[in-house]
Image (cartoon, grey):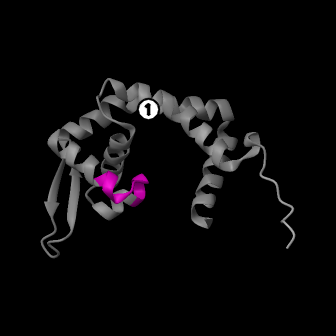
């Protein structure tokens, strides 16, 4: 049986590697911003989701924050211990938990809002508004197609 005539693309043109490099470039200033708050980027994502969408069950948070449930469980436990979120058991389905951002968690979002906005604006400036929006559209399309 003949081998398929396929070669892996150069690592310079590899989509997974390019996405990882880009992620690191985007996340570096965000990590720097979060140092002062003492939270991780994953905790930031959870707080952002709860701030934007309001109370959520854990499955919704996991999907919106791109986190696996075991990781989310640890993050939720830590955020609860730090009083950045509150948890409630659904009155109709006792197995279902809802999480809500607490005032201290919202304060972290509010305290970092200006800097987070500047970081996003800098990337938009570097790419140009149209290309920035195109990039987000292409990534959303990739997310929903794969």
Tell me the SS state at disc 1.
Answer: helix
Point out the image quarter for the C terminus.
Answer: bottom right
**82, above or below 62, in the image:** above
Q: Residue at position x 65%, y 39% from top?
A: 129
Between 81 and 71, which is closer to the camera in this rendering? Answer: 71
**52, above or below 93, in the image:** above
**20, above or below 96, in the image:** above
Q: Give yes or no for residue 19 being in the magenta stretch.
A: no
Please give the residue where the numbered disc 1 appears in the rendered image. 116
Q: Residue at position x 20%, y 41% from top?
A: 84
Between 50 and 18, which is closer to the camera in this rendering? Answer: 18
Left or right? Give the position of 101 relative to 45.
Answer: left
How far from the left and from the top, in percent, is residue 105?
Answer: 24, 40
Left or right? Give the position of 24 relative to 106.
Answer: right
Left or right? Give the position of 112 relative to 86.
Answer: right
**Magenta highlight: main SS:** helix
How far from the left and from the top, in percent, is residue 127?
Answer: 67, 35
- Asked which quadrant contains residue 82, the reply is top left
Q: Give yes or no for residue 64 being in the magenta stretch.
A: yes
**Start-end of magenta stretch:** 63-72
How far from the left and from the top, in percent, is residue 76?
Answer: 24, 50
Left or right? Give the position of 72 relative to 125.
Answer: left
Q: Residue at position x 29%, y 28% from top?
A: 37
Residue at the extreme bottom = 92
Point out the image quarter for the N terminus.
Answer: bottom right
Numbered disc total: 1
- Asked which quadrant contains residue 62, the reply is bottom left
Between 123 and 83, which is closer to the camera in this rendering? Answer: 83
Q: Label 1 crowding class (10 Å Cα cut-off): few <14, some 14-19, many 20+? A: some
Residue at the extreme front = 1
């Amino acid at each position: 049986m003949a081998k398929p005539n396929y070669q892996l693309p150069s690592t310079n043109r590899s989509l997974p590697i390019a996405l990882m490099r880009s992620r690191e470039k985007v996340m570096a200033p965000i990590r720097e911003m979060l140092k002062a708050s003492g939270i991780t980027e994953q905790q930031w994502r959870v707080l952002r989701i709860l701030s934007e969408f309001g109370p959520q069950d854990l499955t919704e948070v996991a999907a919106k924050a791109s986190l696996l449930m075991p990781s989310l469980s640890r993050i939720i436990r830590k955020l609860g211990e730090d009083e950045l979120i509150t948890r409630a058991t659904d009155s109709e389905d006792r197995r279902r938990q809802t999480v809500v951002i607490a005032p201290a968690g919202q304060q972290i979002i509010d305290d970092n809002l200006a800097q987070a906005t500047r970081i996003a604006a800098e990337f938009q400036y570097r790419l140009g508004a149209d290309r920035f929006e195109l990039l987000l559209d292409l990534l959303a399309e990739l997310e929903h197609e794969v």
